[in-house]
Image (cartoon, rainbow, N blue to C red):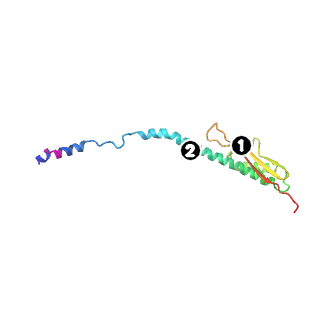
């Protein structure tokens, strides 16, 4: 038995057992640094996507209000101001996606054959100090009697 321990095989096994294996991940602690570098970019993309969505919802709200105003004003013998009144009512019920729409208020231009309603305002802003103006118009023909 003593001869087995004194041989080179046993000494080599003991040496291998105590030897440290190479570290498969030599850059320990790199994850927090990578996160600190990437997190501002991720947050910027997140807030930018929310802002883009808010602008699109504000544009959609303004366009729907303008279309509602055109539909009210184009009716046969509709009273003057019916379109602007309907657009205002729509915007009151739509929520606050469109801000400052009431400063000039919705406006409708009426001719003998056409109606054009315009709604202007600003979208909600996720980033303070950044404003996105919104202006949407809708157009329609006035209902009238015509000869066959």
**Looking at the image, which residue is at 60% across and 45% down?**
50
**Looking at the image, which residue is at 34% across and 44% down?**
24
Image coords of residue 64 (percent x, y): 72, 51
Q: Is residue 25 magenta?
A: no
Q: Residues at badges 1 and 2 in contact (C-beta under 8 Å)?
A: no
Is residue 89 visible in the rendered structure shown here? no
Q: Is residue 22 above or below residue 83?
A: above
Main SS of the magenta part reads helix
Image coords of residue 41 (percent x, y): 53, 40
**Quadrant position of residue 134:** top right
**Looking at the image, which residue is at 58% across and 43% down?**
47
Q: Is residue 78 above or below residue 17?
A: below
Give the residues drawn in magenta, as a range.
6-10
User: Few, some or many C-alpha atoms within 10 Å of disc 1 (few <14, some 14-19, many ≥20)?
Assistant: many
**Looking at the image, which residue is at 21% across and 42% down?**
15
Residue furthest bottom in the image:
148
**Quadrant position of residue 77:** bottom right
Which residue is the site of mark 1? 121
Which residue is the site of mark 2? 46
Is residue 3 visible in the rendered structure shown here? yes
Frontmost residue, 9 versus 42? 9
What is the secondary structure assignment of the residue under circle 1? strand
Q: Is residue 8 magenta?
A: yes
Q: Which of the two discs, 1 and 2, labels the residue nearer the N terminus?
A: 2
Q: Is residue 127 left or right of residue 17?
A: right
User: Few, some or many C-alpha atoms within 10 Å of disc 2 (few <14, some 14-19, many ≥20)?
Assistant: few
Residue furthest right in the image:
147
Image coords of residue 81 (percent x, y): 82, 49
Question: Which quadrant would the C terminus be assigned to in this image?
Answer: bottom right
What is the secondary structure assignment of the residue under circle 2? helix
């Amino acid at each position: 038995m003593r001869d087995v321990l004194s041989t080179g095989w046993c000494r080599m096994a003991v040496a291998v057992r105590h030897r440290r294996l190479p570290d498969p991940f030599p850059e320990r602690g790199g994850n927090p640094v990578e996160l600190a570098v990437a997190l501002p970019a991720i947050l910027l993309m997140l807030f930018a996507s929310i802002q883009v969505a808010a602008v699109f919802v504000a544009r959609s709200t303004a366009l729907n209000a303008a279309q509602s105003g055109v539909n009210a004003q184009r009716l046969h013998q509709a009273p003057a101001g019916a379109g602007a009144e309907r657009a205002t009512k729509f915007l009151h019920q739509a929520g606050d996606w469109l801000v400052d729409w009431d400063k000039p208020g919705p406006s409708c231009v009426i001719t003998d054959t056409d109606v054009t309603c315009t709604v202007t305002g600003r979208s909600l802003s996720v980033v303070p100090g950044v404003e996105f103006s919104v202006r949407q118009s809708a157009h329609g023909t006035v209902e009238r009697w015509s000869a066959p």
